[in-house]
C-alpha cells in the first residue's frame, strides 16, 4: 500500500519528514517498508509552504491485506498525525492518502499527472478532493483519505503517492540522509543550539564528492558554511544529499555531532529540476511556475536596493523578461554583472511577480565587447589626440593625422558554459551542476 502525508509542520516546530521517519519505524508491526520512504518536493513558489514544500510517502508491503488490517493502519497513521501535527498553527492543514494495490494500475497515470502538476503548477484543494472522491467511488476498498482543518495537505499527499507509484519509470531520483535531534533538544522544547562539528562535515564532503553535494557552501572561500544544518526549531540536525544511499551513508558516518534520536534515508526528487518547464517565448510563462528559456541579453544588470541584480532578456519574438539574481545568491551576481547586450544565454528559474528568479544560467554565445579609443600613432606608437571638433585626431609629435577613433575588443571575464547559485541559495529541486554528465554540460 501507498501512504502519502503532508502539511503537519509549522515555523514553530515539527517537520513532516520526522513524522515519516517515525511512521517508517513504527509501521513495521503491520508490514515491511519497501525501499526507502519518499521525500517529494513540490512547486517551490507555493505560498502555503512552511519551508521547502515537502510531501512524504511510504510504500508498505502489508503482512495481511484484510480490511481489519487496512483500518488499523489508517487509524494508526491518522492518530500519529493528530499527535504530532502543529494543529494550532493557521497554516498547518494535514492530509493523508492511502492507496492499496488493487487501485495501483488504474491510478498510475492519473496520479502521475497529479504529481507532475503539483511539482510544476498550482492545484486547488477542490481538485484534490474531487480526485479522491472519484477514486474512492471507483475503488471503495482501496482508496482512503483523512484530513484535518482545511485539508490542504491532501494535495501533497496525493502527489507523493503519484511520485511513488511512478518511481520505476521516472528514474531521476536522489537520496538524503536526514538525522534527527533528541526530542529534549528540539528548539520548540527550549533545547540548545545544534552542535555539528564543521570540520567533520568538510571531511564528509571531501570523502564523498561528487557523489554528495550541498553539505558545505564554499562560495565564500574564507568562511565555509555548513549548509546541511538547518537553524529553526524543527527536529532535523542535518541532512546529507547525494546520488545513492551508499554515498550519503558514507558521508553521514564521518560526521561528529550532538547525540541523535534517529536517522532516515529518503529517496527524493531533490536535485532533479523536476519543477522546470521548457518554453520558447516569455508570453508562454505563467506566474508561480518555473521555466527554462533561451534568449538574448537586452540590458546589462542593474544592482538595486538590497543588493539584488536585475537585467532584461529578449526572446526570439522580441518578448522581454526581467531576470533577477537576488542578494542571497552571493557570487553568482558577479557573473550576472558581466553579461552584456547581445550575449546569448539560457536561464533557469521560478517566475513570480513578473520576474524570473534565477537558479542557474548557461552562457551560449558571448557578444563582442567593443570600446572606441583615440587611435595610436603609426610612427611613434603614442596615443593621438583630438584635432578639434570634426577634425579627426593628430599626433602632437609626428604631426600624423587620422580621421576616426579605433574600436578595441575588451576581453570578457566570463566564458561559455553553465553558472549556478551557491548551495546556500539553491532550491531543493534545482539540479546542481555537480550532477551534470560531460554530455549534459555540452548541451
Ligand atoms: P516542510 O518542508 O517543513 O515539510 P513545507 O514547506 O513542506 O514544510 P507544508 O507545511 O507541507 O510546507 O505546506 C505546503 C502546502 O502546500 C501543503 O498543504 C501542500 O499540500 C500544498 N501544496 C503543495 N504543492 C502544491 C501545489 N502545487 N499547489 C497548491 N498547493 C500545494
Image (cartoon, rainbow, N blue to C red):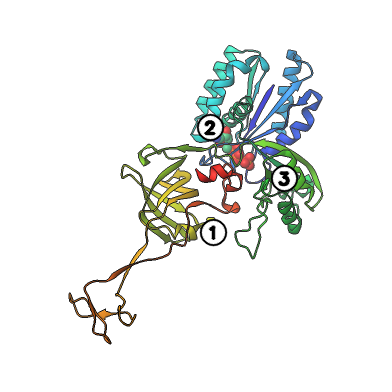
User: Is there any visible trace of residue 247 in the rendered image?
Assistant: yes
* Residue wearing tag 1: 330
* Image-based side of 418 in relation to 172, left or right: left
Residue shown at 54%/34% (left/top)?
A: 119
Is there a contact, CB below 8 Å, between mark 1 and mark 3? no
- Determine if the C-beta at disc 2 is less than 8 A from ligand 1: yes
CA distance separating discs 2 and 1? 30 Å
Q: Residue lying furthest bottom in this view? A: 397
Left-right relation of 16 to 408: right
Question: Along the line of sight, which residue is nearer the eye, 250 or 51?
Answer: 250
Q: In the rendering, which numbered label is found on residue 235?
A: 3
Dividing the picture into quadrants, the one containing residue 144 is top right
Q: Which corner quadrant of the image does residue 284 belong to?
A: top left
Q: Where is residue 113 in the image (x, y as percent from the top left)?
A: 52, 26
- Dot 1 falls on a residue whose secondary structure is loop
Location of the N terminus (image quadrant):
top right
Up the image or down, 359 lies above or below 56; here it is below
Of pointers 2 and 1, the one earlier in the residue sequence: 2
Q: Which mark is residue 118?
A: 2
Image coords of residue 309 (percent x, y) = 44, 57
Amino acid at each position: 500500500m501507498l501512504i502519502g502525508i503532508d502539511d503537519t509542520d509549522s515555523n514553530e516546530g515539527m517537520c513532516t519528514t520526522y513524522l515519516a521517519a517515525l511512521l517508517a519505524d513504527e509501521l513495521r508491526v503491520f508490514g515491511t517498508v519497501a525501499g526507502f520512504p519518499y521525500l517529494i518536493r513540490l512547486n517551490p513558489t507555493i505560498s502555503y509552504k512552511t519551508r521547502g514544500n515537502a510531501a512524504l510517502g511510504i510504500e508498505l508491503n502489508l503482512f495481511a491485506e484484510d480490511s481489519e488490517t487496512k483500518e488499523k493502519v489508517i487509524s494508526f497513521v491518522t492518530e500519529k498525525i493528530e499527535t504530532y501535527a502543529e494543529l494550532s498553527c493557521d497554516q498547518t492543514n494535514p492530509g493523508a492518502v492511502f492507496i492499496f494495490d488493487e487501485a495501483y494500475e488504474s491510478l498510475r497515470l492519473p496520479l502521475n499527472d497529479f504529481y507532475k502538476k503539483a511539482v510544476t503548477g498550482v492545484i486547488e484543494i477542490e481538485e484534490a478532493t474531487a480526485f479522491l472522491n472519484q477514486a474512492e467511488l471507483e475503488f471503495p476498498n482501496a482508496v482512503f483519505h483523512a484530513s484535518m482543518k482545511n485539508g490542504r495537505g491532501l494535495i501533497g499527499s496525493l502527489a507523493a503517492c503519484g511520485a511513488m507509484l511512478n518511481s520505476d519509470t521516472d528514474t531521476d531520483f536522489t537520496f538524503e540522509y536526514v538525522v534527527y535531534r533528541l526530542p529534549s533538544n528540539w528548539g520548540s522544547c527550549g533545547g540548545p543550539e545544534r552542535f555539528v562539528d564543521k570540520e567533520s562535515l568538510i571531511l564528509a564532503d571531501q570523502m564523498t564528492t561528487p557523489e554528495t553535494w550541498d553539505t558545505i557552501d564554499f562560495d565564500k572561500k574564507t568562511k565555509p558554511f555548513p549548509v546541511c544544518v538547518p537553524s529553526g526549531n524543527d527536529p532535523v540536525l542535518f541532512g546529507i544529499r547525494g546520488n545513492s544511499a551508499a554515498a550519503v551513508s558514507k558521508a553521514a558516518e564521518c560526521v561528529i555531532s550532538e547525540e541523535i534520536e534517529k536517522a532516515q534515508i529518503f529517496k527524493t526528487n531533490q536535485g532533479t529540476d523536476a519543477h522546470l518547464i521548457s518554453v520558447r517565448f516569455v508570453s508562454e510563462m505563467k506566474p508561480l511556475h518555473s521555466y527554462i528559456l533561451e534568449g538574448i541579453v537586452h540590458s546589462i544588470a542593474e544592482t538595486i536596493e538590497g543588493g539584488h541584480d536585475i537585467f532584461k532578456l529578449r526572446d526570439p519574438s522580441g518578448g522581454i523578461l526581467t531576470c533577477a539574481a537576488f542578494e542571497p545568491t552571493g557570487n553568482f551576481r558577479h557573473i550576472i554583472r558581466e553579461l552584456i547586450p547581445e550575449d546569448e544565454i539560457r536561464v533557469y528559474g521560478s517566475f513570480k511577480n513578473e520576474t524570473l528568479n534565477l537558479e542557474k544560467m548557461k552562457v551560449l554565445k558571448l557578444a563582442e565587447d567593443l570600446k572606441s579609443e583615440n587611435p595610436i600613432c603609426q610612427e611613434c606608437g603614442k596615443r593621438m589626440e583630438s584635432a578639434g571638433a570634426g577634425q579627426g585626431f593628430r599626433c602632437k609629435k609626428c604631426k600624423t593625422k587620422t580621421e576616426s577613433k579605433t574600436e578595441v575588443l575588451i576581453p570578457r571575464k566570463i566564458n561559455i558554459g553553465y553558472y549556478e547559485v551557491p548551495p546556500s541559495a539553491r532550491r531543493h529541486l534545482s539540479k546542481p551542476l555537480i550532477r551534470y554528465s560531460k554530455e549534459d554540460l555540452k548541451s
